Amino acid sequence: MDKQQLEVIRKSFTFEQRLSDYEDYFKAAVLVPLIEIEGELHFLFEKRAANIKQGGEICFPGGKFEITDSSSLAAAMRETQEELGCDQDQITVLGRLKTLILASGVLINPYLGVLNCSLSELKTDPQEVDSIFTLPVASFLERQPDRYDCLVKVHPYVIDSETNVRTDLLPVINLGLPERYQEPWGDSIQKIYAYQTESGVIWGLTAKVLYDCLTDIQELLSIER
């Protein structure tokens, strides 16, 4: 590299934050829906259909970012319309919540919004949604979720569940790496949140999005006092 090439690099680089391997992440978007029930704001939750991934678990509307989506917000709105059967013009988006980057290689962009309709107007997609239910926002503001610290390790190999044959993903010996890397390593902590409710356990990704949302709400309300 010469000075002329260095000058090209100097002029091109910025201080904008970027994510390494961004294109490799599984990108998704969700909407945290608020709906008014008898004069009180509730969170609306879905129970996933039994025949889909993570069937029977509780979640918010959302899903994979598609190439046809103009933005992560557009993806969240589209998924909400498909799953709940409401028109997008019945949704007032209040803002964007904290982006989640998971150790599993998933990047989630959540949004907070208000459904300007009644529960009876919603026509859920039975292919994706088994049922819906709501819980008052106030019921979460004075409580903390259960928290569990789980270990995340790097696994340099996989073992076939049928043949019990090991396949190395990282050629530790060929690369001349220390022998300890032939076995799983790392001790990173993945915080797992869980809210136990009368309608079931809200946990994992959904609980983390809910926790972040409640944290934002509490901070904003405290500023107004």
Image: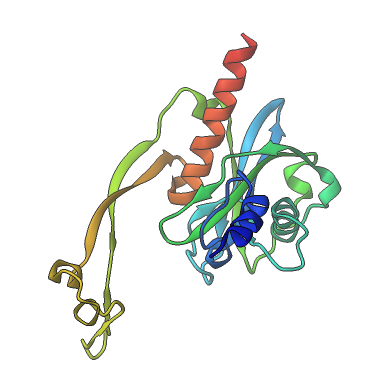
Q: Residue at x 56, y 64 (%)?
A: 49
Q: Residue at x 52, y 29 (%)?
A: 215
Colouring: rainbow
- Residue 140 coordinates in the image, percent (x, y): 50, 29
Left or right of 168? Residue 3 is right
Q: From this viewpoint, is residue 199 visible?
A: no
- Quadrant of the rendered structure where residue 2 is? bottom right
Left or right of 213? Residue 74 is right
- Residue 210 coordinates in the image, percent (x, y): 53, 39
Left or right of 189? Residue 91 is right
The furthest residue to the bottom = 163
The furthest residue to the left = 179
Q: Quadrant of the C terminus?
A: top right
Decide: is 134 above or below 177.
Answer: above
Q: Residue at x 26, y 88 (%)?
A: 162
- Residue 164 coordinates in the image, percent (x, y): 21, 86
Q: From this viewpoint, is residue 81 visible?
A: yes
The furthest residue to the top = 225
Front-lying residue, 48 or 106? 106
